[in-house]
Image (tube, rainbow, N blue to C red):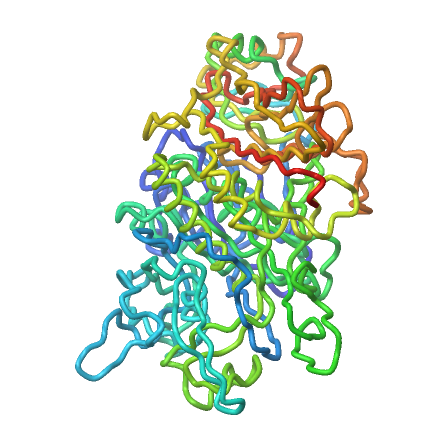
Amino acid sequence: MATITVNGNTINPAAADYVSRDAKGYDFIYIQAHHDLSIDEKRQLAEMDVEIQEYVSKHTYLCRYTPDDLERLRALTFVRTANM
Amino acid sequence: MIEREADRTQYEVDLILHTQANMNTTALAPQVAQRAGVDISELEVLPNKIRLTVHQDRLDNLAALDSVNRIEEVRPKRVYNDQARGILQADALFKSTGYEGADQIICVADTGFDQGIARDDSSIKVHPAFVGRIASLAKVWDPSDFKDHHGHGTHVCGSVCGSGIYTNSVQGKSIGVKGTAPAATLMVQSLMKFSKAKKLWKFATPSDLATKLFRNPYESGIRIHNNSWGSEWDEHEGQFGYEADATAIDGFVDKHQDFVVLIAAGNDADEKNHGVSQIGANGAAKNCITVGATGTTRPNDGNSYNADGPVKTGITNTATFSSRGPTKPTTNSFGRIKPDVVAPGVAILSAASRSVAPNAEVRTEFGPSHDPDWLFMSGTSMATPLVAGCVALLREALYMHGKKQPSAALVKALLINGAVNYSSRNGLGFDFEQGFGRVDVDSSVVMIKQSTFVEGGSKLEATTHDVRALSYTPVTNSRWESPVIPVPSGRSRFIVTLTYPDAPGALLQNDVNLVVRAGQVERHGNMGSDIGFDHISKLPGLVHGMSADRIADNVEKIIWDNIPPTNVTIVVQASGFTKPDSVQAFAVAWRIQALSGL
């Protein structure tokens, strides 16, 4: 889900409380961590096919992720949420 | 969702794609048209975004498209000069450095140039201040006659490299008036767009700055681009955030790291609902030089010449209209330090376009000049080209000292390290009205002559001034340390600036910190004498209703008075990269002043 900035209102999906079931058909996700990720944590994500694109919000990364399974990302201790 | 205007439901928006989206904009267009409920012919399809006018109820549907990163409203643009009564500007605000910008070409994107031709033809004589100064006139919109009926563009061009004689017919006095780089030449891009329906020319910027504004000058070999324009102030919106123009500017400079982009800060500090900070949209870009305005040496009341009165806005004062920073705060940051630098912008005397009618309002609106070839204007629009000319001088000096393809980061570091802030009350050497200070190109040139600068990660050359980029592969490459820098005995002030290009995004993508070590003692960039990094405890009275005091910026400066003179080194340390395999370029410039002389 993209952010929308119109009339000064930015709807930031990282702030929304919903949980996506999986990433089927979608290649871009937001991963919110408990802290700013270390280089090693980022490399760990890269090995799981997560390509970090941009730092978009506090501890939150926009990532390109082609597999469908979000649970394996959520299982990581440093990941707080992983959603589309 | 959209609360402001009850009677407005259609919005012109940009759909901006992810940088590695699965499909390109052409392939995506049919889906966009279908979800927006418009005909595909009504979409403007660009390399990395699609512009369209859409009903607000359709926005959620468009946002759900996987390839779309974000949707932003398209905002009207304007040029940044202001109403003011004129005064005689005797220039000489920039002392002679010996450089005049020879072999440098600056691109000015503005309201056009003079009578629309670069050289005299059989019937038209080009304004005499520009003999041999116009390299080319380049189209942005079609049709384009390049004529400057407005006056703004020619005035801006004159501040870069015009050179002529101004004769005040009432006082009978003649003086020479010069821009800051009188030996440089210009490419002028006319941003006047012809409206067939309204039968008039209107100022408009292209939807894609990268392909429609920057690419042509860059491919022509031009490395300096002046933009004395920005988004029109909207009293309901207040300060704009980091929006489409900022992304385009940062993206282009990140990919073309030797392209210097200058942006006027805006004149919105005294607009309705101005709030505390006004700089946003294009001025919020991380990789540009955002320029604010100071006053002048002559008596004035802040906007008008006042012969019998005091100097209200002096040469070290910030103009009352000059837009203030920081950039709009986010959940993670107070905002970034803007403007970057300031330069004179009150009642600047420069060339009058010969396409402006003899009785046009602009001739008297800014005070009578009593010479039809010259007129006065005020605004951050006027400060910006003065700095663009200074950039030309610095690039010329660098070339003469072996650095032939300097990065924009290096030019920015030299400019900022030579600048002096006169308004800061927090002892940090920067604030949010003058940024890092008023440009002093002489100080910047001294650093070039003394070779007190380095550039890290250049892909263009490998001179004695070049070192490797920062990276985490291996982790030992994540920091650069200078050799020991000799500091004279006695009391010294050590001044150093770090800048680096950052990937597009409202937040800083890569965090790099500047440290100066003198023996066992350290100072950190933008921190004064506080410990830690990237936060500020001595905020200059700014309140955004936030507890965040984090200022993470891709520009860091240290001014260390009475630095202990032994074992002084500069350290540039990567603190966190969004993409772990980033290769990060950077630039550092430093200088030492004897304190007893200050």
- Estimate the x, y position of residue B176 in percent, counting from the top left: 44, 73
- Estimate the x, y position of residue B301 in percent, counting from the top left: 72, 74
Image quadrant where one finds the C terminus of chain B: top right
**Above or below for A47 versus B131:** above
**Above or below for B367 versus B576:** below
- Estimate the x, y position of residue B277 in percent, counting from the top left: 70, 52
Work out which residue is located at the far left of the displayed protein and give it. Answer: B122
Residue B10 in sight here: no
- Estimate the x, y position of residue B32 in percent, counting from the top left: 42, 44
Task: Identify the residue at image location x=45%, y=29%.
Answer: B455
In-image side of B366 versus B223 (left or right): right
> Number of marks in the image?
0
Task: Identify the residue at image location x=26%, y=61%.
Answer: B136
Residue B262 in sight here: yes
Task: Identify the residue at image location x=42%, y=61%.
Answer: B160
In-image side of B519 versus B380 (left or right): right
**Above or below for B469 versus B451:** above
Task: Identify the residue at image location x=60%, y=13%.
Answer: A38
In-image side of B418 versus B544 (left or right): left
In-image side of B104 versus B550 (left or right): left
From the viewer's side, name the closer residue of B38 and B29: B29
From the viewer's side, name the closer residue of B547 and B266: B266
Q: Find residue B29 and report its image quarter.
A: top left
**Above or below for B448 versus B478:** below
